[in-house]
């Protein structure tokens, strides 16, 4: 990865920071996205303590706000002519429903819209990297989604009683569907898009708000962040994954995408809805 540029969202802790450190260890220059500059800079210092020769740049971005994602993408495009790897790994679990200043439900805005926006807004530098290096990679951290389905009349969990068990699993399915749609739209460009199920990751700030049995089980039985980062790093860097796209992976093995995860109409419908919420015309990218 020497001379390559990578960007990792949510890289101030947990799995995402481990992925960023792994990319830095492979000699990539890594843009560290954090909710504010202080947190991003702290992550840079932590990673550099483990990888002294790391080339890292902190970048502040509140990924729940579309305006902030747009500003961050503008900065990346202005500073770097191309981008070799984009790892979308930011996420939230919230006990109560919150609405952002832009009017979107926080979990959907963070877990779905930020992935959609970063992937689209950074397509030009990704395509340039693919043209010069042979391939560029988008890696979306997602999850097995079980029997979850998207309620297109309530994507932002505004109806009924809110809980993270209702709001979060559909966003994991949405990430898989967006990855598939990206892969289809990018065929022939050299930009590959894959989703990854890292499994439970212990001692992550992701579950700080929800607590309870789920947090206890995760911390008791989950992998370390470094263990969970193995497959995302493999997808981002390995020669054998350079031509792989549109799949969901775990432990370097392809997973099936049953139910709505194989529904092409749902995939198209979600893309159109994300485009609408972004204020685009549905065919922006």
Image (spheres, grey):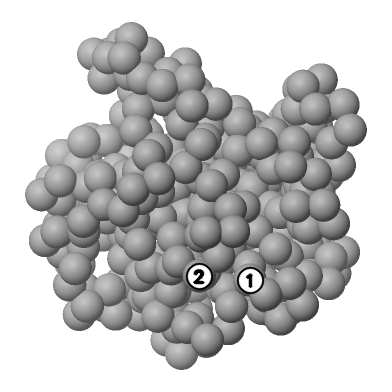
The spot of residue 69 in percent (x, y) is: 63, 59
As helix, strand or loop, the secondary structure at mark 1 comes to loop
| Residue 158 seen in the figure | no
The spot of residue 230 in percent (x, y) is: 51, 36
Residue depicted at x 83% and y 72%: 81
As helix, strand or loop, the secondary structure at mark 2 comes to loop
Above/below status of 160 relative to 202: below
Residue depicted at x 84% and y 65%: 80
Q: Are marks 1 and 2 in contact (CB under 8 Å)?
A: yes
Quarter of image, res 43:
top right
Residue depicted at x 19% and y 68%: 262
The spot of residue 20 in percent (x, y) is: 67, 39
Residue 135 is marked as 1
Give the class, few, some or many, for how many residues have Cα within 10 Å of label 1's Cα (few <14, many ≥20): many
Residue 79 is marked as none
Alpha carbons under labels 1 and 2: distance apart: 8 Å
Residue depicted at x 34% and y 33%: 199
Quarter of image, res 161:
top left
In the shown orientation, is residue 160 left or right of residue 104? left
Q: Nearer the viewer, residue 173 or 67?
A: 173
Above/below status of 116 relative to 89: below
User: In the rendered structure, which disc, 1 or 2, sits on the residue that comes first in sequence?
Assistant: 1
In the shown orientation, is residue 22 left or right of residue 232? right
Task: Name the residue carrying label 2.
Answer: 243
| Residue 217 seen in the figure | yes
């Amino acid at each position: 990865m020497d001379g390559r540029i990578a960007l990792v969202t949510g890289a101030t802790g947990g799995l995402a920071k481990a992925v960023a450190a792994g990319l830095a260890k492979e000699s990539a220059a890594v843009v560290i996205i954090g909710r504010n500059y202080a947190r991003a800079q702290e992550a840079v210092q932590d990673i550099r303590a483990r990888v002294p020769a790391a080339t890292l740049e902190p970048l502040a971005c509140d990924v729940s706000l579309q305006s902030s994602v747009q500003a961050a993408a503008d900065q990346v495009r202005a500073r770097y002519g191309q981008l070799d790897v984009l790892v979308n790994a930011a996420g939230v679990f919230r006990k109560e429903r919150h609405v952002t200043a832009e009017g979107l439900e926080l979990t959907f805005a963070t877990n779905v819209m930020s992935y959609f926006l970063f992937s689209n807004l950074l397509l030009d530098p990704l395509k340039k990297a693919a043209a010069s290096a042979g391939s560029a990679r988008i890696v979306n951290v997602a999850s097995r989604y079980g029997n979850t389905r998207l309620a297109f009349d309530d994507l932002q969990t505004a109806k009924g009683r809110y809980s993270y068990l209702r709001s979060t699993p559909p966003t994991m399915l949405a990430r898989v569907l967006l990855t598939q749609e990206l892969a289809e739209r990018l065929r022939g460009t050299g930009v590959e898009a894959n989703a990854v199920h890292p499994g439970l990751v212990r001692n992550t700030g992701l579950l700080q708000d929800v607590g309870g049995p789920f947090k206890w089980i995760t911390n008791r039985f989950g992998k370390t962040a470094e263990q969970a980062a193995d497959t995302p790093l493999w997808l981002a860097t390995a020669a054998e994954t350079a031509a792989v796209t549109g799949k969901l992976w775990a432990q370097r093995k392809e997973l099936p995408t049953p139910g709505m995860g194989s529904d092409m109409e749902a995939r198209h419908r979600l893309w159109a809805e994300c485009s609408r919420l972004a204020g685009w015309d549905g065919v922006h990218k």
